[in-house]
Image (cartoon, coloured by chain):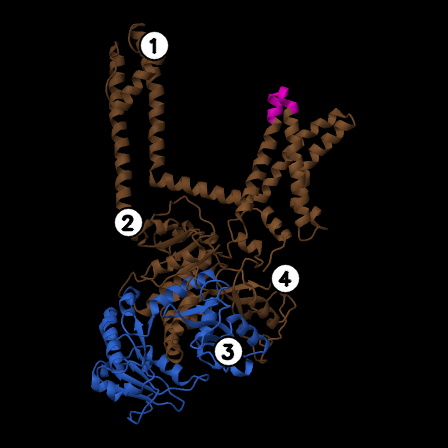
Chain colours: A blue, B brown
Amino acid sequence: MERSNSFETLSGHVVICNCNEKVKTIVEELQNSTVQSTLDVVLIVQDHQLWNEHPRWHPIVSGTARFIVIYGSPTDKSILQKAQISSAKAAIILADPKHGELADAPSSLTAIAIERANPQVHTVMELLSSLNRPHIEHTEVNEIICIGEISEKLIASSCITPGVTNIFENLLTTEDGTPQIYINKIPHKACHMSFRQLTKKFILNEAPFILIGFIAVFHSRSTIVINPKANGPLNKDMSLPGDTKLVTMGYQKPDFLPYL
Amino acid sequence: MKHSYKDIIHELMEPYRGSFRSSPGSLIVDIIIVFCILMSCLLIPLGYFFPRFDPFFWKLEIGFTILFSLEYIIRWMVSPNPIIYPFTLFAIIDFLAIMPTLLVVHADFIFLPVFRGLRLLRLLRLLKFMRYRLFFYRAYIRIRNWSSALTHHYHLRQIRLLFLVTLLLWVMGSNLLYFTETRLAGNEGPYSNYWQAYWHIIIVLISGIEDKEPLSFLGRIEVSFFLLIGICFAGLVTAELVSILVKKMNRSGKIQLKAPTSQLHHHIVIIALNPHLFNVIKQVSAAVKGRNQILIVSRRGDKIKIANPKHYKKVHALPGDPLNRSILEQAWINNASRVIILSSDNDKSDTLLEKDNRSLMKTLAALSFNPSVDMTVELQTTDSLKYASNLSGIHFIVARLFGERLIGQAVMSPRVTEIFTSLMTYTDDSSEFYLIPVPTELVGKTLKQAQLFFADLDEEPMILVGIDRSPKSFQCSNFKLNPVSDDDGLSSPGVILGEKDKLILISYEFPSFAQVNKDDLWKGRILLRR
C-alpha cells in the first residue's frame, strides 16, 4: 500500500514510470531486500483509474522505505521534477498496458525524456518486442529488459540443463540466504593483479563470495568478461587496471579488502 | 585437466559417438576396425569359392588376426581395470574373434588338419559389431527416416504402385498380343515375334501412340485397350509430378513436415506455437549444435513460415492437435529427450489463466506418454504455479517473475542484466551453468580444493560456484550456490565432495572430463553441445 504521498526531499531513490502487474514485485524487491539498503520508490501513474482498478498491483511495503505515487505523464518535465528525477538513482520504465503491444514506442520516448532530465540516472526499460531492441540500444537507455527474451532463454536453458532455472531463480531473489551477483569497483590494493591471482587469494582466504568475472575497458568500450579464458585480449592473467569492476557471486555486497 | 597417453588411447579406441569425447581419430580407428571385420569375414566365402587363392587369403587372415590381437592387447592395457577386463563382455567377444585363427595356426603346427574346420568360427568376429551398435542404430534410424521422408514428400508410394501396375500390364499385354497374333494371323505380323511384342507394347503404354498395327481384329481391339491405358498412365504420371511440384511450391518458405512413418529418437519436442518459438529453436539448436532433431507439434504446424530454411534443416513440424493421442504417438514423445510446452497464442481471446490451463493439459498428455522425460512448460501466471507444482520434476517457467526480479536487480547492480543474459545464452563466447558429477580425482576433496583445482584449468576455463545434492530425477532441487556459511550440510567451504554430488560450474562448454553415464547418453537424458 502507499506509505506516503508526501514530497520530502528524496535522494538516491527509484522512479518507476507507468503501472502494470510488475509494480508490486519490483517495489517489494527494492524495498524488502535484506541484502542491500532499501530504496525509496516514486511511482508515476498516468492512468489514475487503471491503478485504482487493480489493487493486486499495489505493493505491500513493510520496511522504512517510502513509496510515493504521483499522477501524471512521465514525459512531463514538471512531473519528473516532482518525482525529483535529478537526484534519483535509477528510473524504471514499465510498459503501459494502455498501449497494448505497441507500448515500446511510448516507453522509449519516456526513457529519452528521463535521460534528458538527468543523464546520470540509470534507466531500465521494459521492452515488449525483442525486435525493437536494436533500435532502442542506440538511445541513451542503460538497460533493456525484454520478458519475452528472458522466457526464450530460460526455456532453452532449462531444456539443455534441466533445473537450471532454479539456479537463476536463486540468483535473482533478494531474500535472505540467497546469493546474488554484485558488480563492484576493484579495490586499489588489488589493482594490477590478475583475475587468476585474485581468484586464488579469495579462495585461500575463505572470502564469502566467488569472483566470476570482471568488467574492463577494451578498445574504449566497457566489456563484461565472465569466466575469463587463459588466452585472448581480456584473459585471466592480464593485469587488471584501476577502473576495472569485479563481478562476484555472494550473499551480501562484497568487502574485498580483508581477503586480499 | 591433463589427459594421460592412456586416456588418449582409451578415447581413440572407444566407438565414435560424435560427442565431445570422440575425436576424429576415434572415427578413423572405428572405420579401420569395421573394414577389417568385414574383410576378414568376407575371406571365408572367398576361400570357399576361389580355393586356388587360399594361401593368399590365409596370409591376409593372419594379418587381420595380428591386428585384432593388437587391438585386444591395447584395449586391455588402457582399460580402467585391467584385472577384470578379460572377463567383460566385449573382451570375451574380442577374444572369440581371434581365438579360431590362433587355434587353427596351432593345429597346423601339431598336424591336425581337422582343426581347419574351426576357420568357420571366425564368423564370430561379427559379434564385434556389438560395440558399434549405437553407430549402426543411428545410421539405421537416419536411413529409415530419410527414405520415409522421401516416400512421403515425392509420393513414391503412388508412383511405385503406378509403375508396378504398368509393369504387370506390359508383361500381360505383350504375352496376350503375341498369342492372339500367332494364333489368328500367323507369323507375319509385328507382334508374332515374342520379344518384339514386348517392345511394341511398351511404346503403346508409355507414349500412348500405336507403334505397329496388329493384323488380327482381336489384336487391334487389345492394342486399342492398351492405348487407352497408356494415355491414362501418361496422365497419371504427369499429374503426380505436377502434384509434387505444386506441393513443393506451396511448402517453399515453410517448415518441412514430418513424414507420418518416420521414427524419431532423442529428439526435442516443442508443443504449441507462440512468437517465442523461433528464438527458442535458435537457442536450443545453438546449444545442442544441431545434434538433435526438433519437432514442433501444433494445429498450425503446416503453416509455420521460416526465413532461412538452412537453419531449420533438423526442424520438422507435425500438424495436429497436441491433445490428440494419435498425434502425440506420431511425435514419438516416448522416445524424446526433452519436451518444451509453449504457451499457445492460437486463441487470442483466451485469458492468461485459460492459456495456462491449455498448457497444463498438454503437459498431462505428454506425461502420459513419457513420465520420465525432462519437460519445460511455459506458464503465464503465478496462480497456475500453485496447482502445477503438484507435477514434480517438471520445470515450470513464469518469465514475468524472472523479469520483475531482474528489473529490481538492474536498479541495484547496473549492468547485471547483461551478465544474466550472457549466462542464459548459448554461444561459443559465453559461459553458461552446467552440472557435472564430481570428477573421480576430486571425490573426498573439499570444495575449496576443488575451486583451486578449477582456477588453474586453462584448457577449459570454468568456475566452480556451487554443489548440487538433489536426487537424480530432480536435478537442482537441493543445491547451494557459493557455499560459505555453516547453516547446513552443504554450506561449508570445507564440505567434502561425495561421489553422488554434482558440481555447478560456469563454463563455456559441457566439461569434456565430465564422467557421463553411458545409459543417460544412450537414453538421451543428457544433451551435449560438442
Q: Is residue B45 left or right of residue A119?
A: right
Q: Label 1 amino acid?
A: Asn
Q: Earlier in the sequence, mark 1 or mark 2?
A: 1
Q: Within 10 angstroms of label 1, few (less than 14), some, or many (20 or more) residues?
A: some
Viewer-nearest of labels 4 and 1? 4
Tell me which corner region of the image, top left, top right, bottom left or bottom right, holds residue A65. Answer: bottom left
Rounded to the nearest whole Å, what is the CA distance between mark 2 and mark 3? Answer: 56 Å
Q: Is residue B53 left or right of residue B16?
A: right
Q: Which residue is mark 2?
A: B253
Depth check, front residue: B187 or B132: B132
Q: Write down the region rendered in magenta.
A: B45-55
Evaluate whether label 4 is on the same chain as label 2: yes
Determine if the magenta segment contains residue B320. Answer: no
Q: Earlier in the sequence, mark 4 or mark 1?
A: 1
- Asked whether the residues under the numbered discs 4 and 2 touch, taking CB atoms below 8 Å apart as contact, a structural biologist would say no
Viewer-nearest of labels 4 and 3? 3
Viewer-nearest of labels 4 and 2? 4
Q: Earlier in the sequence, mark 4 or mark 2?
A: 2
- The dot on residue B440 is 4
Q: Chain of mark 2?
A: B
Q: Is residue B200 left or right of residue B334?
A: left
Q: Which residue is mark 1?
A: B193
Q: Which residue is mark 3?
A: A190
Residue B503: x %, y % from top left: 56, 67
Depth check, front residue: B383 or B113: B113
Evaluate whether label 1 is on the same chain as label 3: no
